[in-house]
Image: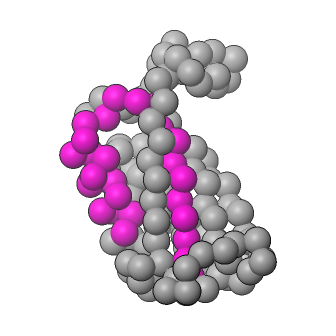
């Protein structure tokens, strides 16, 4: 399970929304083993006055906040970040300086999904690899 928030400048997000989503989901499937059908992306297309950042970031600057079930190995999480960097770099020509990723792990029991607690769900993929 991964819930992903994507923050970016409105013009860039509006022009590249599907490509960004596809790149993020490709990385999620590669590194985390998420199924094709498990895409949970929320875009926050911000006006310049609502998205303050250092001058060395461009209009393509993206911040990804990714909420995950706790339990994956450190190397899996590191690979995930690398896959995100590579996929977004290729898909929308994103500079390394224009991408920040935060992975937020939460115990599965702290999730409520489809009327169940996260640790009661029967998933078709592994969250401990």
Side of 64 where 31 appears, left or right? left
Q: How is the image coloured?
A: one colour
Q: In this picture, is 112 found above or below 18?
A: above
Residue at image position (63%, 15%) is: 116
Q: Is residue 92 visible?
A: no
Q: What residue span does the magenta drawing correspond to?
A: 60-85
Question: Observer-nearest residue: 72 or 28?
Answer: 72
Q: Is residue 21 visible?
A: yes
Provide residue 125's location: percent of width, then percent of height. Answer: 38, 32
Quadrant hosting residue 27: bottom left
Residue at image position (54%, 65%) is: 63
Residue 13 belongs to the span the image colors magenta: no
Side of 38 where 76 appears, left or right? left
Residue at image position (61%, 54%) is: 5
Provide residue 117's location: percent of width, then percent of height. Answer: 59, 16
Q: Identify the residue at the far left of this view.
A: 75
Question: Considering the image in quadrants, where does the C terminus appear?
Answer: top left
Q: In this picture, is 115 found above or below 61?
A: above
Question: Observer-nearest residue: 22 or 59?
Answer: 59
Residue 83 belongs to the span the image colors magenta: yes
Provide residue 32's location: percent of width, then percent of height. Answer: 35, 45
């Amino acid at each position: 399970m991964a819930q992903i928030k994507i923050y970016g400048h409105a013009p860039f997000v509006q022009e590249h929304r599907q490509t960004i989503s596809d790149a993020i989901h490709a990385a999620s499937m590669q590194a985390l083993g998420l199924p094709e059908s498990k895409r949970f992306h929320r875009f926050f297309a911000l006006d310049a006055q609502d998205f303050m950042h250092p001058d060395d970031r461009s209009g393509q600057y993206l911040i990804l906040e990714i909420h995950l079930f706790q339990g994956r190995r450190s190397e899996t999480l590191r690979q995930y970040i690398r896959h995100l960097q590579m996929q977004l770099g290729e898909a929308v020509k994103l500079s390394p300086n224009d991408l920040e990723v935060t992975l937020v792990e939460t115990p599965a029991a702290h999730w409520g999904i489809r009327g169940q607690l996260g640790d009661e769900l029967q998933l078709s993929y592994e969250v401990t690899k």
